[in-house]
Amino acid sequence: MAFFSDFLWMAGGILLLFGGGELFVAGSVALALLLRIPQIVIGLTVVSLGTSAPELFVSLLSTFQGDDGIAVSNVVGSNIFNVLIVLGMSALVMPLRVKSRLVRRDVPLLLGVSMAVWGMASGGRLTWQAGVALLVATVMNIVWEMRTAGEHPEEGDPIDESERATPRVAAAKLAAGLVLLVVGSQLLVKGAIGAATQLGVSETVIGLTIVAAGTSMPELVTSLVAASKGKADLAIGNVVGSNLLNQLVILGLCATVSGGEGLLVDPVMIARDLPIMVLTTLACLPIFWTGGVITRLEGGILVALYGLYLVEQLLLYRAPTVLDEYRLVVVVAVLPLLLVFLTWQVVSWRQRRSVAVPSTGLGE
């Protein structure tokens, strides 16, 4: 009976998330038109701040309760989920055209922040000084995004006049969408944690997978809705911006309020999950660069890689005796194939570029 009630919580959460995603995308597009700001910048700032609210709520609550493991694993797991599942599934819905500013500026910035967080956490704790530094970087990044909003207006998605709205209507859609997204994600996480606990799954796995996936549902739903409507700017910008803010804002705030002892980071996470987070971000560069489009094939590969990550998590705690063999298969077979594919993509793209007329941008 308890398991059935947990299932109902999850189902209700998913329904609220889809409704919230529709409203939030509509409100953010209307806001972009009102403010004459490129939609990719709205995706990197307003949409990202809104869809990162569940991660912020869960991680801060965990920090106040002294559960640093959930606070950190939620952010790391969410970032991995965002790149592999949110981007991957969005590309499966519709191939996503990548704007050149993402390759030139936003993804390298995300990669740099991810490596910095890994370095800060390598000692086993994120200190309050590190938290303050991350928050200062947050302010600098938002100011930078707003100041450079109009540098490349030609890279914005085509404007649909039917999407215009009054400021009051745009604000109402954003607010209603955000409320539904936050409430829906909390219902989903509550049901998922309850079901996982009854099935005997460990708290570490819950933090990195179920909680991370649950709090990333707003990003997933928002990006899927945006992709289905042809709003690639919002779909991609939402993921990149959310991953930035997850580390800068959420980890920054959690480390700052953790006090003198700092935010404890699990050694396993330092050795495995943080490097995976950095590698998934690094993998975006060749995928984003080649042809300026994330294809359905590339989206499928990203989703498949998350499947491998989930198997690794489950084997670690449920069947550790076969974990070494599994890792050997991944290292010997899967990783070389992935490297060959990425290399082939880059070489093919360069060959196409050499015989094509030079263009002015990646997304053209």
Image: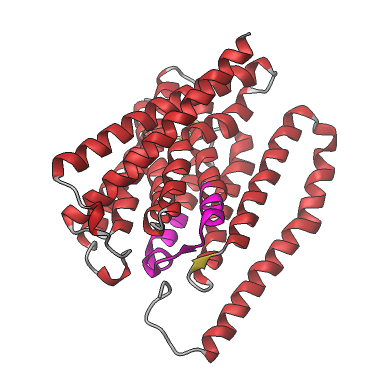
Q: Residue at x 43, y 38 (%)?
A: 218
Q: Residue at x 72, y 33 (%)?
A: 314
Position of the N terminus by quadrant: top right
Position of the C terminus by quadrant: bottom left
Residue 162 is situated, as x and y percent measured from the top left of the image, at: 24, 54
Quadrant in which residue 99 is drawn: bottom left
User: Does the magenta segment cover residue 57?
Assistant: no
Q: Main secondary structure of the magenta part?
A: helix
Vertical relation: 218 (above or below) 364:
above
Q: Nearer the viewer, residue 92 or 282?
A: 92
Q: Nearer the viewer, residue 317 or 194?
A: 194
Residue 190 visible within the image: yes
Residue 52 visible within the image: no
User: Does the magenta segment cover residue 111?
Assistant: yes
Q: Residue at x 37, y 35 (%)?
A: 20
**Color theme of the render:** secondary structure
Vertical relation: 84 (above or below) 214:
below
Residue 6 is situated, as x and y percent measured from the top left of the image, at: 57, 17
Q: Nearer the viewer, residue 244 or 229?
A: 229
Residue 320 is situated, as x and y percent measured from the top left of the image, at: 80, 32
For the view shown, which residue lies furthest in the front direction?
A: 162
Q: Which residues are magenta?
A: 86-112
Q: Residue at x 25, y 57 (%)?
A: 144
For the view shown, which residue lies furthest in the top direction?
A: 1
Quadrant in which residue 298 is drawn: bottom right
Residue 118 is situated, as x and y percent measured from the top left of the image, at: 51, 46
